[in-house]
Image (tube, rainbow, N blue to C red):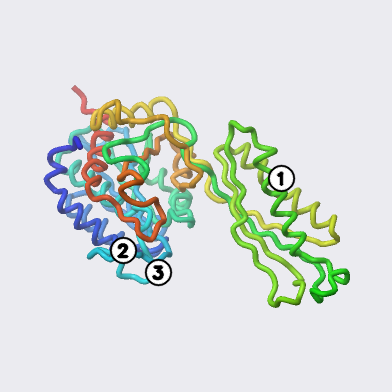
Amino acid sequence: MPIVNRIAEFHADMTQWRHQIHANPELGFEEHQTSALVAAKLAEWGIEVHRGLAGTGVVGVLHGAKGPNGRAVGLRADMDALPMQEANDFAHASKVPGKMHACGHDGHTTMLLGAARYLAETRNFDGTVNFIFQPAEEGKGGGRKMVEEGLFEKFPCDLVFGMHNWPDMPPGEIMVKPGPIMAGADQFDIRIYGRGGHAALPHHSIDPVVVAAQVIMAAQTLVSRNVSPIEAGVVSITQVNAGSAYNVIPQEVSLRGTVRALTHEVRDMLEAGLRRIVDTIPQAFGATAEIEYRIGYPPTVNSSGTPNDLARAAAEALVGRDRVHDDLGPSMGAEDFAFMLKERPGTYVWIGQGGSELGCMLHNPRYDFNDEVLPLGASYWAKLVETALPKAA
C-alpha cells in the first residue's frame, strides 16, 4: 500500500500503541488510561494538549510552520470500547473481562496519533489542525457532549473529518461519498398492560402477549408499506419480556427496539407511525399501552463540494482513483460523528480493513483491527491536512 515513508518508519511504534490500547479497553466516558496515553504522546511531540472536554476527551492543537492564519480543520478519532467479552487469545487480547475493542477504535486512535506525530515533525501545511480524540461513541453520545461543551468555540474548525475502518473492504481501498453515509438511530420502550389470569381461562383475561404480537407485526409494516422502496428505514423489536409461569397470563408485556433511518423525514414518519400503533392497536383488544421514544444519533450526512473533494483528492493521491469508491453504503449503523457534521461541514470516510473473507465484521468477539492498515490511515490524515491547508507558494 502506498504510504508516507516517514510514517512507514514508525509503523512498529504505532502497532505497539494500538496493542496497548486494545489490551486495556475502556468504556465510554471511562477512557482514563487511553486519554492519558494520547495526551502524553501529543505532548511528547510538542503539540498543545487540552484535556477534559466531555470528561475524558483530548484535543491536540498544532499550527503550521508559519503559525495560525485563521484556517483550521478538525480530525476526529473515537477512543471507547464495547461491553462485550473478547474471544481472541493473541498476546494483546483484552485484559479486562467483559470489555473489548470490537469496533476498531483502538486503530482509529492510533492512526490519528500517527498522523499527529508526522505533522508535528514536518509542519508542511499552513493553518491549524485540531486533533479531536473523542470519548463514548458507542451509544453514549460523546460527540454530542463535546459539541455541547464548546468544541468548535474553543477549537474553531472550518471543516471537520472522521474515518472508520470497514472490514468488508480490502486494505488499500477507501470509500468517499457525499450525502447520508450512516443512519440515525433511536430507541424505544413499549409497555402493554392487560389483565392477568389463569392460562386455562383466557376469557377472564385481557392477554397482553396477544396484543404484543399484533403490535410487533404492525410495526413491521411501517417500513414495508410506508417508506418508499427507494428510501431506507429499519424498525426492529429486539426484546420481548413477559410472564413468569406456564399457566399464568401475565399482567403486562414490555417491548424494546430501535428505529433507523437515513433521512430526518423517514425518521419522523417511523416515530409517528410507531406511536400511532401503540395508541390504537392495544385499545382494540381492551388493553392499554405507552411508549417511551428516545431520539438518539442523527443521520451522518457528508457534505458535498469542498469537504468531499478534499477527502477524495487525499485518498486518490494515496491509493489511486480506481481504489477510491463512492458506490458503497450507506450503512444502517449509526455514528455520533453526526453531531459534529451538524455543526461544521465535513466528510466521514471508510477505510478498508481486510475484506470479510479475511476477518469478521465489527462488534464480533473475534474482531481485531488490521495493523497493516495503520500507516495508510495515518498517511490519509496527513495527506488530507496538506491538501486542505496547503502551504503558500
Comes first in the chain, label 1 or label 3: 3
Q: CA distance from mark 3 to mark 2?
A: 13 Å
Q: Residue at x 48, y 44 (%)?
A: 339
Task: Report if the CB atoms under discs 1 and 3 are less than 8 Å apart.
Answer: no
Q: Residue at x 80, y 61 (%)?
A: 288
Q: Which residue is mark 3?
A: 98
Going by the numbered disc 3, the residue's amino acid type is Gly
Q: Which residue is mark 1?
A: 273
Task: Report if the CB atoms under discs 1 and 2 are less than 8 Å apart.
Answer: no
Comes first in the chain, label 1 or label 2: 2
Residue 11 x/y as whole percent: 16, 48
Comes first in the chain, label 3 or label 2: 2
Using residue 364 as the reference point, say whether residue 232 is left or right of it: right
Residue 194, image quadrant: bottom right
Of 305 and 172, nearer the camera is 172
Work out which quarter of the rendered image holds the N terminus and state it: top left
Q: How many marks?
A: 3
Relative vertical location of residue 127 with respect to residue 198 in this rendering, above or below: above
Using residue 35 as the reference point, say whether residue 270 is left or right of it: right
Q: Residue at x 71, y 45 (%)?
A: 273
Q: Nearer the viewer, mark 1 or mark 2?
A: 2
Q: Residue at x 37, y 43 (%)?
A: 168
Q: Which mark is residue 168?
A: none
Q: Which residue is mark 2?
A: 88
Q: Nearer the viewer, mark 3 or mark 2?
A: 2
